[in-house]
Amino acid sequence: MADLDHDTAVERISAAVEGTARYRGTISREWEIWGPCGGYGASLALRAAGAHTALARPVSFSCHYLGVGRFDDVDVEVTTLRSGRTVESLQVSMTQEGRRIVEALVLARGEHDALEHDLAEAPDVPGPGELPSIAERLAERGEEAQPLYPFWANVDSRPVQWHHEWPPAEALDPTFVEWQRFQPRGTFDDPWVDACRSVMWIDIGGWPSAHRHHAWANVPWVAVNVDLYAAFHQPRPASEY
């Protein structure tokens, strides 16, 4: 069974020279969704940045997807662009047999005093314990919950929005509102691993959100992300969903 921590781990294969070191990871087939999940590939890049820096946690991550990787080893080169006492800027290049897969920038920070405030309001929706999972909803209809791609076998999904009839008869709001928990482990003490949860779901949510507004027309294509940006606010390592 897949494990987010194990499957995004990287190994250093060269010492740092002038701020640059090389790492190696493996793209696991357990995270297949139309090929390797983009957010999973981005998570490998993020973990390499975490292995490179001595600072405590990521602040932000941005990347371009330049190619589709194979389920095999990848080489990851991490370069420190600028390093200070409390922040560090890192460039991450992921390749496979010389072919570029992901180019990323990561900002890391240490633990220090700073201005703090939290005025964000979470959506007013039922909690995960109040909602049935997708498997339970399908069982109500007498259908077996067989994931279309291996990726979804690693996730306990509890949709807030659910439509028994699909495609719908009309355009729906372009939003993707679901509680998600990775299996078999849903939380991680390492803040770099925990940030991978956000990277995964920010990457995954784009197409389902957009598609809901057009699914009624049975559009003949699927649009995948070519870039990604995540800012890591309000870590919740104790919350599985």
Image: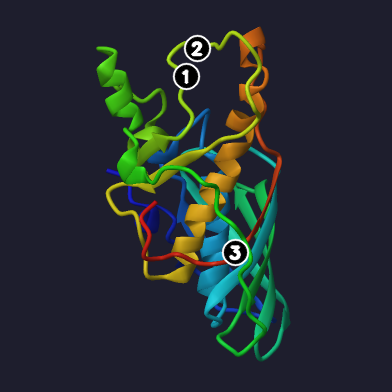
Q: Quadrant of the N terminus?
A: top left
Residue under label 2, please give it: 166
| Cα–Cα gap, marks 1 and 3 | 31 Å
User: Which kind of residue does numbered mark 3 sit on?
Assistant: Phe
| Image coordinates for residue 137, horizontal then vertical, percent | 32, 23
| Image coordinates for residue 167, horizontal then vertical, percent | 54, 11
* Callout in the foreground (1, 2): 1
CB under 8 Å between callouts 1 and 2?
A: yes
* Picture layout, residue 206 above or below residue 25: above
Any mark on residue 232, and which?
3
Q: Residue at x 45, y 63 (%)?
A: 193
| Image coordinates for residue 151, horizontal then vertical, percent | 41, 36
Any mark on residue 163, and which?
1
Q: Decide: few, some or many residues near mark 3? Use Cα within 10 Å; few <14, some 14-19, many ≥20.
A: some
Q: Secondary structure at mark 2?
A: loop
* Picture layout, residue 77 above or below residue 37: below
* Residue 30 or residue 180, whichever sits in front: 180
